[in-house]
Amino acid sequence: MFSFSPKPRSIRFLCRPEDDGVIPPPVPAKTFLPDWFRKLPAVDPAKLSTGDSGLTIKRCMPFLDAMTAGWIIRLPATVRMEISDGGKKVDSAWDFDRTLVSNHGAHQVAGNPRQPAPPCKFHNYWTVRTPPGWSCLFVQPLNRPNGIFELVSGVVDTDTYTAEIHFPFFATGADGLHVIEKGAPIAQVIPFERTALELVADIRAEGQDESQDRRRVFRNTIASDGWYRKVARALR
């Protein structure tokens, strides 16, 4: 008797033939960690003498899991962004033969908390395709603040919308010239199965068993470095 393994699920990033080898390809987020995080020690020895655990955020699995989820889409070419008039004006130029940044009228998002910054948009030349029933969350690269722009988050049904997806953003930098180099991370792509959004919420006070489980998990987490990664996940 023969058994057949199901075809593995995959996410596809497709570019125009003329862009292949020209624009930086998307990369797994876990392979594109910022320099400050790579240089951070897992334990700060200077803190041990104070009775502190000395553990840094490098040991915080929720922080790391968010940072390494999905893929990173990178800037196709270097962009020079001039922010002026207290953030009310954003002018951009780039080293590329197609549009990389465009602006929208502020009236489109009147009253938003980012005023007076005008809404802008990064033009992306990668098409994202997922299996049936899967969508993608597009967000500012998580835990990677850049001090220049902040992406507007969005969800796209990438199983049916098979065109290029552009990324709205607000400039957040100080007045002056800001240079965003080719290959800089501009968006994080996190695929998810839409059935996950159909979960029904159970909102109530915890029971005795749930209370005991909460305390057990918390105490194990603080008593053993890495317990969450090694044990809690294995129980799922």
Image (cartoon, rainbow, N blue to C red):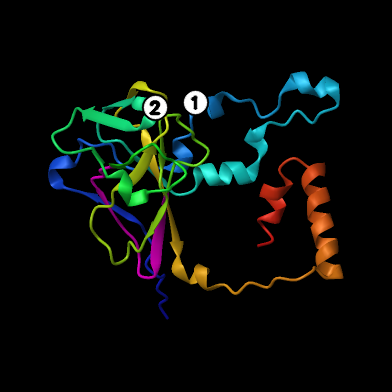
Q: Residues within 10 Å of mark 2 (few under 14, many from 20)?
A: few
Sequence-first tag of 2 and 1: 1
Front residue of this view, candidates 123 and 131: 123
Query: Residue 27: x and y, percent?
Result: 37, 41
Q: Residues within 10 Å of mark 1 (few under 14, many from 20)?
A: few
What amino acid type should be assigned to the residue bearing mark 1?
Asp
The residues tagged by marks 2 and 1 sit, at their Cα atoms, a distance apart of: 30 Å
Does residue 56 appear to the left or right of 137 in the view shown? right
- Residue 148 figure quarter: top left
Bounds of the magenta segment: 122-138
Residue at x-position 80% and y-position 43%: 222
Residue at x-position 34% and y-position 61%: 130
Does the magenta segment cover residue 127?
yes
Residue at x-position 38% and y-position 43%: 187
Can residue 231 be seen here? The reply is: yes
The residue identified by callout 2 is 86
Query: Residue 175: x and y, percent?
Result: 38, 23
The residue identified by callout 1 is 35
- From the image, which quarter does the N terminus lie in? bottom left
Does the magenta segment cover residue 41?
no
Q: Secondary structure at mark 1?
A: helix
Which circle, 2 or 1, is nearer the viewer? 2
Does residue 22 appear to the left or right of 106 in the view shown? left
Give the answer, above or below, for where 48 lies relative to 16.
above
Query: Residue 200: x and y, percent?
Result: 60, 74
